[in-house]
Amino acid sequence: MSKVLIAPSTDPSPLSELTEYVKELERDKADWLHCDVMDGVFVERKTIDEVVVSLLSTKTQLPLDVHLMVANPQDKVASYAKAGAHSITVHYEAFGGKMQLLNTLHKMRTLGVKVGLSIKPGTDIECILRYLPLVDIFLVMSVEPGKSGQSFIKDSLTKIAFLQKYREENKLDFLIEVDGGINEKNVNMVVGIGADIIVAGSAIYNSDNRAQTISKLRCE
């Protein structure tokens, strides 16, 4: 099995602590930094924006994995690419139609970032199958987007296993990323059925030994 990538989230760190927290994550051998961008419209909360992402790009060598939980992401992907994103993930539910989503996925490719797509827990996985050949990352939300510290939704396991099988059968090479409620108790199950990238917010931020938690989440 390939190395599991650990992408600690910027949420729930307070903005005032974020720069130091990110430096610590880099020292503790995190692989990516998952930048949770919420606009208060697509989800109720509002968090960081492209200004903060641009600042973080000057403070860390970690690849910035930008997760856009925003309305009208087609208008924002270019600014996040310019801000230093390594990958950008958009939500299927944020688009008005198939062509708008297709155009945005192609636009991200031309911007030179890794192309990511995600769905909310209640969205049928069948909706996005046609787009999988166009993406580098598919993000399975294992909690409802918008709030840190939620419990893992067990139905997400079915989606992860389905994506792993679909990827293999169709000879695709996108990475499966999982975000929400993952901790040391359930990570082995998630990785065992196909996850390549583990996003963790509270499990790492609230840990007394963050380096050890990152190592355990990597299933080492």
Image: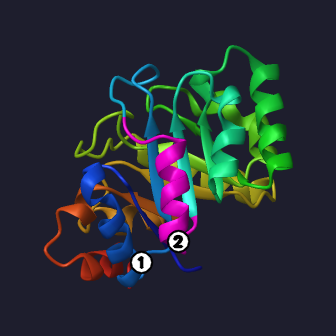
Residue of label 1: 26
Q: Is residue 74 above or below residue 47?
A: above
Indicate the amino acid at tag 1. Glu
Residue 20, image x and y in percent?
31, 69
Residue appearing at x 52%, y 28% in the figure: 70
Tell me the magenta residue range: 47-63
Q: How is the image coloured?
A: rainbow
Residue appearing at x 26%, y 82% in the figure: 212
The magenta stretch spans residue 59:
yes
Circle 1 Cα neighbour tier, 10 Å, few/some/many (<14 / 14–19 / ≥20): some
The disc label shown at residue 62, or none: 2
The answer to whether residue 23 of the structure is visible from this angle is: yes
Residue 185 as seen in the image, left or right of residue 115: left
Residue 66 as seen in the image, left or right of residue 102: left
**Distance of mark 2 from mark 1, alpha carbons?**
7 Å
Residue 61 as seen in the image, left or right of residue 152: right
Residue 57, image x and y in percent?
55, 63
Q: Residue furthest left?
A: 208
Q: Nearer the viewer, residue 52 or 178?
A: 52
Q: Nearer the viewer, residue 86 or 137?
A: 86
Circle 2 Cα neighbour tier, 10 Å, few/some/many (<14 / 14–19 / ≥20): many
Labels 2 and 1 touching (C-beta < 8 A): yes
Which of the marked residues, 2 or 1, is nearer the chain's N terminus? Answer: 1
